[in-house]
Image (cartoon, grey):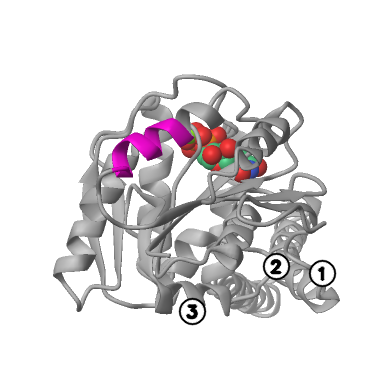
Amino acid sequence: MNLSLVVPCYNEEDNIYDFYDCVNNCFKNCGFTYECVFVNDGSLDNTFDKLKQLANKRCGNIQVVSFSRNFGKESAIYAGLSHAKGEMVCIIDADLQQHPKVVLQMLDILNTNPDIDCVAAYQKDRKEGSFISFLKSCFYKVINKISDVKFVSGASDFRLMRRQMVNAVLSMTEYHRFSKGILSWVGFNTEFIAYEVQKRQRGKSKWNIIRLIKYAFEGIVSFSTVPLKISTFIGFISSLFAIGYLIVVVVQKLFFGIDIPGYATIIVLILLLGGLILFCLGIIGEYLSRVYVQLKNRPIYIEKTYLDSSNDEKK
Ligand code: UDP
Ligand code: MG
């Protein structure tokens, strides 16, 4: 198998057939073998039925992995990569916002440049609200400052990788997955190309602002320990401030006989320090909770059904 397309699907019933037809139209005369690995991420609509119908057509190039519930796109990507059989693997959305013709461009680059291991596409123009764009660009600025891993603004997980890189990504079995970071952390020569993101034709985007903020937070905590250092820094500065203030108060009292000012200062200081302590504990807690979850060693996803159009149903 030359190429595997890993397609995470969550409530994409209206897009499955269009996506598969579009892939076939793009690739049919290209002279290489390809497969689609659809991952049904616990969809609540008829996505699984549509995928089952596709696989039952026995086209020979469809795998369907269906989860027991919604585990999130990151887990779906991991499952798809685990099942992909191709020498090259491309992660692509099911909603046709990322047109399969871009994959041909990516293939062309990998086939003509043996030194390049991965071609990643970034959005030429973002087709989203200016507030969201602003938040995203702030995220990239912050994370690039505080993380050793390089994050390219606008680059999603839409990318084509050689088998060696896919195996490297699969070797990272962390539970809290942040693909943008993982794909960059594994290294390998990556070429970035611009692509025009299409408008979603059917269905709804699963990302709202709360989910995006949680995702950004996940990225920061997964790929940087700077927030922990910030809490140490805040603790250090407030201790210096406290020692300085203590000296001032002692000098005032002993040498000038000035009374220590009343409750207001004390209450403000207690509140300030209490707030800072809780803030820093919260940051430590975020890291600790990840250690806790990772230690439980829970699986990244649970497979309920697996279909391979070249075999019979296995589970
Ligand atoms: N997706 C998924 N699990 C989720 C959310 C999304 O598998 O929990 C899939 C979704 O079906 C689509 C891709 O991830 O194929 C990108 O999602 P979406 O189009 O909602 O994101 P956007 O393009 O708006 O960033
Ligand atoms: Mg989309």
The magenta segment = 20-28
Q: Which residue position holds label 2?
A: 175
Kindly report the distance in space between the C-alpha atoms of the residues bearing marks 3 and 2: 16 Å
| Sequence-wise first label, 3 or 2 | 3
Residue 79 position by quadrant: bottom right
Callout 2 amino acid: Tyr
Q: Residues within 10 Å of mark 3 (few under 14, many from 20)?
A: some
**Distance between the Cα atoms at labels 2 and 1?**
7 Å
Kindly state the secondary structure of the residue where label 1 is placed: loop
| Residue 21 badge | none
Which of the labelled discs sits on residue 168, or is there none?
3
Residue 71 is situated, as x and y percent measured from the top left of the image, at 73, 50
Q: Quadrant of residue 164?
A: bottom left
Q: Secondary structure at mark 3?
A: helix
- At 27% from the left edge and 41% from the top edge, which residue is drawn? 101
Q: Earlier in the sequence, mark 2 or mark 1?
A: 2
Q: Is residue 48 visible?
A: yes
Q: Image height check: is 148 above or below 313?
A: below
Kindly identify the residue that appears in the image at 64 percent across and 76 percent down: 239
The type of residue carrying mark 3 is: Ala
> Looking at the image, how many numbered discs can be counted on the residues?
3
Residue bearing the label numbered 1 = 298
Q: Is mark 3 within 8 Å of ligand 1?
A: no
Q: Is the residue at mark 1 in contact range of ligand 1, meaning its CB lies under 8 Å from it?
A: no
Classify the position of ligand 1 by quadrant: top left, top right, bottom left or bottom right: top right
Identify the secondary structure beneath mark 2. loop
Q: Position of residue 233 (x, y in %)?
A: 55, 74
Residue located 45% across and 20% down the image: 201
The crowding category of the residue bearing disc 2, from other C-alpha atoms within 10 Å (few below 14, some 14 to 19, many at least 20), is some
Residue, far right: 296
N-term-proximal mark, 3 vs 1: 3
